[in-house]
Amino acid sequence: MSNSGIVQLFKPGKQSGVTAQCYARVDIHEKPVICMCFNRKYECVISADLSGKMEYWNRNEPFDRPPCPEQVSFAYLAETDLHYFHQNSCIPLCINLSPNNEMFVVKDSLGFVTVWNFRSGKMLFKIDENSHVYEQFQKSFAPTLHKLCSSFCYFDENHPFQVNDIQFGRLVALERELKNTINSEVIFDDSNQFIIYPTIVGIKSWTLSFFILTSYKVLQTAIYLLLLLLLLNHSVCRLLGKQETVRFLRLALFQGIPQSVDLSAAQRLGADTVGVETCARKIEEDPTLFATGFNKQTFYLFTKRYYEFRLLFKLFNNHNYIYIYTYMYIYAC
């Protein structure tokens, strides 16, 4: 990418130390490209520039725009919703694909998170994550709705998005500073059913799938069914790090099985001996969310491990800290 809007394609050298050579230049955008991603399944690139213009194009010459019907289901961009950002005078700040390459998610400069179908280029739904939404939560919320929802979800005594007033004031001030500097991102989990992204009150996990209830014989009313669908579809299923004053930014999710732990290396870093030995004995899936914070020389790990791993570890590495939050620190809603 360059300031002229031209995307340069490089082919990495086969030998180490050899400078990669630019083998093609794609001149599609008039403004500088700010973010892009590559769909391996359909061999197609999505790119967005500073004017809010989004493009699909083939990675191979002649870089067709839009790609062939085998890659997408539309012939013209006018058939899609990709003009949404340009029409609303906002800029896509982050584009990430789902693991199955069928959806992608965008975070824009107006604070909205939008989920899209890749092949059709249609927007599936959008989430308003502006600070004014949380300011409204701070002022008031419906007690009846809170009481109704608490029978289906785990809620604290207060609204799950409400925080201490003093802390919230600091978060709002930090959000204004953050808006003009660094951008956060949105990621999918491996099941393609959840999106995870940082917000002003913590890290949210949204579920994208409909749930079909089969355990009930007959639902008494259509209103009850509608309520269940509203609660279980496109809803926040988890909120992480609410108790922290950190504004989380970058995220990475690990959902595999960890390799064995080198005890001597871990102990040299200052890790707790009992916790490390217990971790080494675990041979099972260990979902862990890695996060960085704004103006913090640390990164944070959220895991579902239980009390046997202690509530909080600190690993010391060149005077920087790695915080590991266990299940006790994860706020479930």
Image (cartoon, helix red, strand yellow):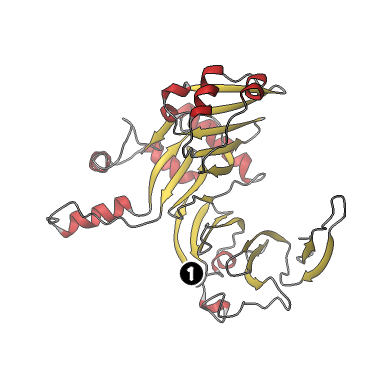
The x and y percentages for residue 24 are: 80, 70
Determine if residue 270 is in view: yes
- Left or right: 108 as drawn, with respect to 243: right
- Residue at 75% in and 65% down: 5
- Left or right: 17 as drawn, with respect to 88: right
- Residue at 79% in and 69% down: 25
The x and y percentages for residue 67 are: 62, 77
The x and y percentages for residue 28 are: 72, 72
Query: Mark 1: which secondary structure?
Result: loop
The x and y percentages for residue 90 are: 59, 59
From the viewer's side, name the closer residue of 206 and 51.
206
In the picture, the quarter occupied by the N terminus is bottom right
- Residue at 19% in and 54% down: 224
From the viewer's side, name the closer residue of 142 and 288.
288
Identify residue type, mark 1: Lys
From the viewer's side, name the closer residue of 103 and 108.
103
Q: Residues within 10 Å of mark 1 (few under 14, many from 20)?
A: some
134 w.r.t. 108: above or below = above
42 w.r.t. 273: above or below = below
Which of the 4 quarters of the picture holds residue 85? bottom right
In the picture, the quarter occupied by the C terminus is top left
Which of the 4 quarters of the picture holds residue 22? bottom right
Determine if residue 129 is in view: no
278 w.r.t. 103: above or below = above
Which residue bears the numbered disc 1? 122
Spot the residue most to the right: 18
